[in-house]
Image (tube, rainbow, N blue to C red):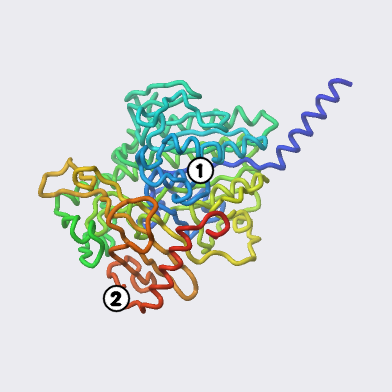
């Protein structure tokens, strides 16, 4: 009788778990979609795109690592997370982040509802570094398994927090190559949790293709000689653009073009390891007969540019290369080889994961659940605009971040305080445009009306945003767009929808 009772309880628990799907979230680091990086990932095409839904209009709400990751983890715009740059004093891995946000990320919500939760890879840029005020013994709440990179993206010679214990890794490919180490850890987590009665959520964040973009040895020469995309904006002198583009960026010469091409080769090489990881995850799920009850998401924390408007490899701009990202999902109920034009954002991931898991979405969530879009049941009105907010970074002496690896006559500015902006991106039947207000400094919060430069692009007419046509826009329309930006910059929760 006891054995019967135990067997019945086990079967009942497995039925309960089956009602709650597993969720795997893969977050690439700096991966573009506009420049075509997905084209080299044939396994991603086969395992995810051909088996699921591709989002044609996926964007981030800020084009830089730490603020974007904070928004992904919480479903809130940077002006609501308080994480607006990559430094501790601006909210990245700071005491304010831990007090204000960390207990309300996706991990605690799902773990409180019975999910086994695993985090693998890059968390926030300064996590567990001295400046953050905590070490690797600090494990953010809500994670059953924690395997978090200390600091920013690396492939070799780094530390991780392995459930609160510092673990050092060197320069051996077999033992230390971080994308492969993440792959191994995720497979182990899946295998262990598959025997549990609980569903699982995995947040998988490899460093690729972020700098230093170090490919695995087998992929080191795969893209040798491949040139970065020579788009219409590549090497284009944007004289009618904001200061960092029009005056702070020298025209590329042969040397800097070669540097961009070498970076491009490395980026593509690292993405092959990312797709190997995805393949291993999917195969493991299939072998354990749980793939059919698992959603697999693929996203990036922002896009990237490679020589566009003469800027070497970077993000941080309001242009399509930097704010558009790859976004694919497969899972139960998702139509195979499908696509959608719905405008979706990085802040939509958090409520989507909760909704799929059957968890109530907090009222202060700025994003919207994509569950109905993913399952093809969306019938209501959807957004046709959103805001991108960015706060320029620089040192106290120059106000800029300068690439000191270059000769003085080839100085490249990665960023400056006056690269701060609020952008209104609109995509509708009547309008496809980007309207951007630039500011002299990164004072947070911004006063929307205190801008000092404006750009406007009709994307249908100027897909590569070559010519700033703000002078042709009627004043009434400009005022309307400013008012909309003011609304979005003040918004919280459903007011952001």
Q: Position of residue 73 (x, y in %)?
A: 51, 43
Residue at the (43%, 72%) spot, across then down: 480
Q: Is residue 392 left or right of residue 340?
A: left
Observer-nearest of 465 and 400: 400
Q: Which residue is mark 1?
A: 73
Q: Is residue 384 left or right of residue 254?
A: right
Find residue 471 and name its label.
2
Q: Quadrant of the C terminus?
A: bottom right
Residue 309 vs 261, above or below: the answer is: below
Q: Position of residue 488 (x, y in %)?
A: 47, 60
> Mark 2 falls on what kind of element?
helix
- Answer with the quarter of the image where residue 118 lies: top right
- Report the Cα–Cα distance between label 1 and label 2: 39 Å
Residue 301 vs 59, above or below: the answer is: above
Residue 325 vs 198, above or below: the answer is: below
Residue at the (41%, 32%) spot, across then down: 127
Q: Earlier in the sequence, mark 1 or mark 2?
A: 1
| Residue at the far right in the pictured view | 1
Q: Position of residue 367 (x, y in %)?
A: 54, 54
Q: Position of residue 296 (x, y in %)?
A: 56, 45
| Residue at the far left in the pictured view | 409
Residue at the (21%, 59%) spot, across then down: 235
Observer-nearest of 226 and 137: 137
Observer-nearest of 184 and 60: 60
């Amino acid at each position: 009788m006891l054995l019967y009772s135990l067997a019945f309880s086990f079967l009942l628990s497995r039925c309960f778990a089956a009602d709650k799907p597993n969720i795997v979230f893969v977050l690439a680091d700096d991966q573009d979609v506009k420049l075509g990086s997905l084209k080299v990932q044939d396994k991603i095409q086969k395992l995810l795109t051909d088996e699921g839904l591709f989002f044609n209009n996926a964007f981030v709400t800020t084009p830089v690592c730490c603020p974007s990751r904070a928004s992904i983890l919480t479903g809130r715009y940077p002006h609501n997370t308080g994480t607006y740059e990559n430094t501790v004093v601006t909210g990245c891995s700071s005491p304010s982040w831990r007090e204000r946000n960390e207990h309300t990320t996706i991990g605690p919500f799902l773990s409180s509802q019975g999910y086994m939760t695993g985090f693998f890879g890059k968390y926030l840029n300064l996590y567990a570094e001295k400046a953050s005020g905590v070490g690797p013994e600090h494990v953010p709440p809500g994670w059953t398994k924690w395997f978090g990179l200390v600091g920013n993206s690396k492939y070799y010679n780094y530390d991780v927090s392995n459930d609160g214990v510092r673990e050092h890794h060197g320069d051996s490919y077999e033992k230390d190559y971080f994308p492969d180490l993440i792959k191994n850890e995720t497979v182990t987590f899946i295998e262990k949790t598959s025997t549990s009665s609980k569903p699982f959520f995995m947040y998988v964040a490899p460093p690729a293709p972020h700098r230093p973009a170090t490919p695995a040895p087998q992929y080191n020469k795969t893209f040798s000689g491949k040139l970065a995309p020579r788009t219409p904006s590549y090497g284009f002198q944007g004289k009618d653009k904001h200061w960092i583009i029009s005056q702070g960026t020298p025209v590329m010469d042969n040397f800097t073009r070669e540097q961009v091409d070498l970076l491009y080769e490395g980026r593509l090489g690292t993405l092959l390891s990312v797709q190997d990881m995805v393949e291993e995850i999917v195969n493991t799920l299939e072998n354990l007969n749980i793939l059919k009850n698992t959603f697999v998401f693929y996203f990036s924390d922002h896009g990237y540019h490679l020589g566009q408007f003469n800027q070497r490899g970077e993000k941080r701009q309001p242009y399509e290369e930097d704010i558009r990202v790859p976004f694919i999902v497969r899972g139960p109920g998702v139509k195979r080889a499908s696509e959608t034009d719905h405008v979706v954002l990085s802040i939509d991931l958090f409520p989507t994961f909760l909704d799929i898991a059957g968890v109530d979405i907090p009222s202060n969530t700025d994003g919207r659940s994509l569950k109905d879009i993913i399952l093809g049941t969306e019938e209501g009105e959807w957004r046709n605009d959103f805001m991108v907010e960015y706060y320029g970074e620089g040192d106290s002496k120059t106000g800029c971040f300068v690439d000191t690896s270059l000769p003085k006559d080839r100085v490249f500015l990665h960023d400056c305080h006056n690269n701060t902006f609020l952008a209104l991106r609109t995509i509708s039947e009547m309008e496809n445009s980007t309207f951007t207000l630039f500011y002299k400094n990164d004072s947070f919060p911004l006063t929307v009306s205190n801008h000092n430069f404006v750009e406007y692009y009709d994307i249908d007419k100027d897909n590569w945003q070559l010519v700033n046509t703000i002078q042709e826009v009627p004043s009434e329309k400009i005022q309307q767009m400013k008012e909309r930006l003011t609304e979005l910059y003040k918004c919280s929760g459903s007011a952001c929808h």
